[in-house]
Image (tube, helix red, strand yellow):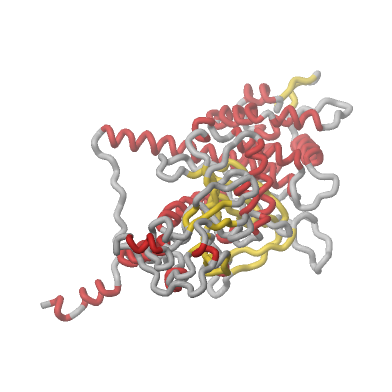
Amino acid sequence: MLNALAWLEAVLDASGVAPRIEKLLPLGVRARQLRVHTLLLGMALSQADGRAAHLTRVHRALVELPRHQRRALGVEVATKIGWHLLTYRQVERTFNLVVAALSKETPDGEPSWLLCDVLDALMEASVPSDVTARTRDLAVDWSDHETFSCPPSHPGGDCADPEASWGRRKCDQPGRKDELFFGYELQAATMVNEEGGSPVPELVRRILITSCAIDPPAAFVAVLARMVKSGVTLGDVLADAGYAHRVAEHWALPVRRLGAKIVTDLHPQDRGPRGTHGGAVIANGNLYCPSTPPALLALGPLARNAIAHEVAAHDVASAELARYKLARRSADDADGFHRVSCPAVTGKVRCPLRESSMALPLTRPEVSSAPEHRPACCAQQTLTVPVHVAAKTTQKHDYPSRNHRLSYARRTAVERTFSTTKDRASNDMTRGWCRVMGVTAISLFAVTCFIVRNKRILDSFELRTIEEERRRVAGRAPQTRRRRRKTLDDLVTTGSPDSLL
């Protein structure tokens, strides 16, 4: 507890949010015993003990501190009649003042800019600078956060939490794909290792809580924009199809404008051929030769239960598809335009419309059915690609290539983020975990929970690193366990009468 207390105090001091909030609170007739710094520290301590996000638990965490710590933090102060211990009503009063100072005058389901600054500062202070220097890549996702309030009894009716709204989440029950819930959308950006880089602790760097009536990806763009404005350089941003399927102006275009490289899964409705530009086929975020075999253009992502020979065949097909892709010949200009050229010009395929390409080795695929009337992509040396072409599906790696699959696999880090904060053995952020309501109140408890979660991940990562180094020095480096998978052919062969002879 004392070690956690010192670390949490260092995080609060580094963030500098407590003095800023203190200046916003009104002055009463008597000076408040509970300072904002101590309140935030008590909220974090209650989460460090795995307690629920209740103000009674915050009060208990503070009064159970050792006597010298209580007096240093102002939990126990000297008065004319003796020592006075902090009461629950004082905790509730200070918390309500902080919530009122950080809330909007008219709540609308989104955090105020003051609250956003507080959340960003606290999360950034919980991530050591040596870790942030090792990676710039982030994995983002959203999850449900059910409010403690009961939903309105009828559409348009009142309830205890007017900022909450109906949302939809995945359902684990058999036969049901999803279900409704009443509450908020909780988003998180988790740090992941760079491609080919060394492992890093999967720390949460930003969070955001908004009403379900607000589109989560569009709301999180503002979080990424504040990161860039604060001096953080974005690398890869990994997201699932829920982000990729949004309108390009709401997610893909602004994220790329911030300097990030998108690595995402495509929605089934966005996969495959989606129109043409200058005669070239638009598919999976790229431009392809109009004579590309349809079977290659229809190539989809690899199944999760694919076996070795299926993976190898899929990688060969993806590499073959890449030969027909129009090669980029320039970087994006100020308006987002760039130029590409025919794959025959760049020596990737043999095409009769490009006589020089027919001198290429026969190992190159050859276009057998060239267009009768040359489109712009076949007649010109280069083709200009405007920013609106494949704006929603363009990403760092060709989809669904091997490089994309390996890079996108890092996104599971953000899934583990939500699983660790909804663990019944520690901080279970399900309904009942937090009984205060509203975006501001819930966000303050949520940010302390994620700060404590970062502390646990850091400690676990350091212990694992020390153990691996000890094993390496001792010559007993742990080996990756090979996953063994039996196929139907293996079982049939094993159980056949011939195998028993």
Can you give x and y, in whole percent of width and height, for residue 19 in the image?
73, 27
Screen quadrant of the N terminus: top right
Extreme bottom residue here?
497
Extreme left residue here?
501
Front-lying residue, 462 or 108: 108
Left or right: residue 40 versus residue 32 is: left
Front-lying residue, 412 or 8: 412
Can you give x and y, in whole percent of width and height, for residue 317 in the image?
38, 65
Left or right: residue 8 versus residue 103 is: left
Screen quadrant of the C terminus: bottom left
Q: Say which residue appears at 60% left-offset and 30% top-offset.
A: 11
Left or right: residue 5 versus residue 195 is: right
Can you give x and y, in whole percent of width and height, for residue 351 in the image?
40, 66
Left or right: residue 137 versus residue 252 is: left
Extreme right residue here?
29
Can you give x and y, in whole percent of width and height, for residue 390 in the image?
58, 60
Q: Say which residue appears at 51% left-offset and 64% top-offset.
A: 379
Q: Is residue 46 visible?
A: yes
